[in-house]
Amino acid sequence: MLKLRKRCGSIFKICFTRRGFRYKVAIFIVGIVIVFYLLIIILNVIESNLDEDMNSFSIIFQGVPKDENVPVLIWWTPFTGDSGSYKQCGRNICFFTDQRKYMTDPRTRAFLFYGSDFKPTDLPLPRLLSHDWALFHEESPKNNFLFSMEKVMKLFNHTATFRRESDLPLTFQYLDNLESLTSKKYFVPTSDKNKNGKTLAPLAYLHSDCNTPSQRDSYVEELAKYIPVDSYGKCLQNKELPPHLSDPMTNMISPEIFHLLAQYKFNIAFENAACQDYITEKLWRPLTIGSVPIYFGSPKVEDWLPNPLSAILVKNFENPKKLAEYLLSLQADDNAYEKHLEHKIQDKISNQKLIDAMKRREWGVNNDPTKKNFIDCFECLVCKRVTENFKRGLKHASPLKFQATIDHYGCPKPVSNFTMKDDNQNWWPELYDKAIYEATAMERLMQKGTNYTATDFYQEVINLLENNAVR
C-alpha cells in the first residue's frame, strides 16, 4: 500500500512537472505572439505616421544629384524656381530641378508641366517609355485649350487640376476652410443692407478681365437694364475703388474689399469659363462675406454649395430679365432673401459632400501654417509614384501604370451664356477649334518618335486645316 502511494506520488510529481513545463512553454509562445503583434502594431503606427506625411516635403539638401538610386524629376516649364534639390516625402526621396540639362540623365523619370506655360512646340522629346509626364494646371481653360482635348490629356500620367477626377483635385483652391463659410466676420445683417440700399445698388460686380469665354460682361450689361448694378473693377465700371484697392491680384482677398462687397445683398459671381469644378474666389468670396452669389460657371456647382439655396444660379433662369425679376422680389422680401443665407444666419452647412471633401483636402491655402501648399503635395504625389516604379525597375519588375484621361481636365467648347449654343460672333470658340488641330498635329509628330521644330508643328497644323482632317 505504501509502495502504491509512493508510485502514485511519483507519477503525480512527474505529471505536474511535465504540466508545468508545458505551461511555461505555452506562456513563452503566447509571449512571443504578443510581442510579434505589438511589433506589427508599432510598425503600422510608424508607417501610418509616414503615410500621413506623404504629402509634405522637406528639403534634405540642395545641389546636384549624386545618388544613383534617387530619381530625377524635371520641371520642364520652370515653376518653383528650384535649380536642384533633394526633397523627402515620407519614405520617398526625389531630386527636383528646372535644369533641362538633366533630360538625358538615366535617372530622369518624370517631366512636370505648368499648364499655362505648356507649349506643343517645346516638349522633352523623344519621349522614353521610362519618362512620365505630370500636369499641374489650376487655371481656366482660356489659358490653354489644349487640355480640353483627349489626345493631349492622355499624354499625362499624373495630374493636379480643378477637376474632382484629377489625381490631386484642386477644386477648393480658393476656399480657406469650412469655418469661413459660417463665420460672421464680414457679415452684414439684412436690416443694415436694406439701409445701404438707399445709396448702393442691390448687386455688386467686380471683374477686371473683360474678355472671357463666358462672355460675362454681355450678360451683366443686359441684366443691368432691369436691376441696378454697381460695377467695380475695369469691366463695365460705373463705380471706382480706392486707388490702393484697384489691383485685381491683391484685392481678391483684401479685407477692405470683403467689407465693401459685404454691404450688398447680392454679388455677381461669373467665372471666366464654364467648366466642371472650375470654381474660384468669384463664388467663395460672397459665400464668405455673407452676400448671395449670382453664379455662372461650373455646371455642377450644386455639388459644392453649403446649402441648396446658398447661390442663385443663372442657368435656372430663361434670360437676364427673368433673373432680375426674381432678384427684385427678394429685395422686397427679407424672409425669402434670408433663405439664401442659411449658412451664415443659422450657422448651418447641410452639404455632406462638401464637408467630406474639405476634410480630405491635404493642402491649405493663403499660407495656412497647419498644412502644406498644393504645389508641395503635387510634387510629393509624383515623387511617390515615380519612386515606386524606379525601385521596381531596379528589381526588373513591371512598372505600375498611371494614365490621365479627358476627365482629369477636359472642358467643353465655349458657348453663349444667353442661348447656351455656339456663338459665331465670339472668338473663343475659334481658339478652341484651333486647339483641336494643334492636338492632332502634336499627336502625329510625337508618333514619329523624334523631336520636331516649331516650323514642323505649324506646317502640320496648316496641312490639317487645309484638308479639314480632324472634322
Image: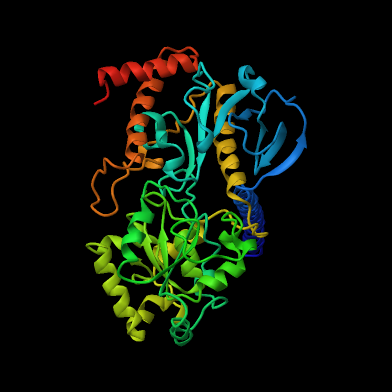
Q: Nearer the viewer, residue 232 or 298?
A: 232
- The residue sitting at 45% across, 30% down in the picture is 401
- The residue sitting at 54% across, 21% down in the picture is 124
Q: Nearer the viewer, residue 429 or 444?
A: 429
Q: Is residue 53 visible?
A: yes
Extreme-front residue of the structure: 238
**Relative vertical location of residue 457 with respect to residue 349 in this rendering, above or below:** above
Could you say where residue 92 lies in the image, as x and y percent from the top left? 64, 38
**304 relative to 52 in the view: left or right:** left
Could you say where residue 154 lies in the image, as x and y percent from the top left? 40, 30
Q: Is residue 346 visible?
A: no
Could you say where residue 183 lies in the image, as x and y percent from the top left? 54, 75
Quarter holding residue 311: bottom left
Quarter holding residue 367: bottom right
**160 relative to 250 in the view: left or right:** left
- The residue sitting at 25% across, 64% down in the picture is 317
**Relative vertical location of residue 440 with respect to residue 357 in this rendering, above or below:** above
**Relative vertical location of residue 3 with respect to residue 392 in this rendering, above or below:** below
Q: Nearer the viewer, residue 463 or 247?
A: 247
**224 relative to 86 in the view: left or right:** left
- The residue sitting at 48% across, 24% down in the picture is 398
Image quarter in which the C terminus is found: top left
Q: Nearer the viewer, residue 326 or 182?
A: 326
Image quarter in which the N terminus is found: bottom right
Quarter holding residue 425: top left
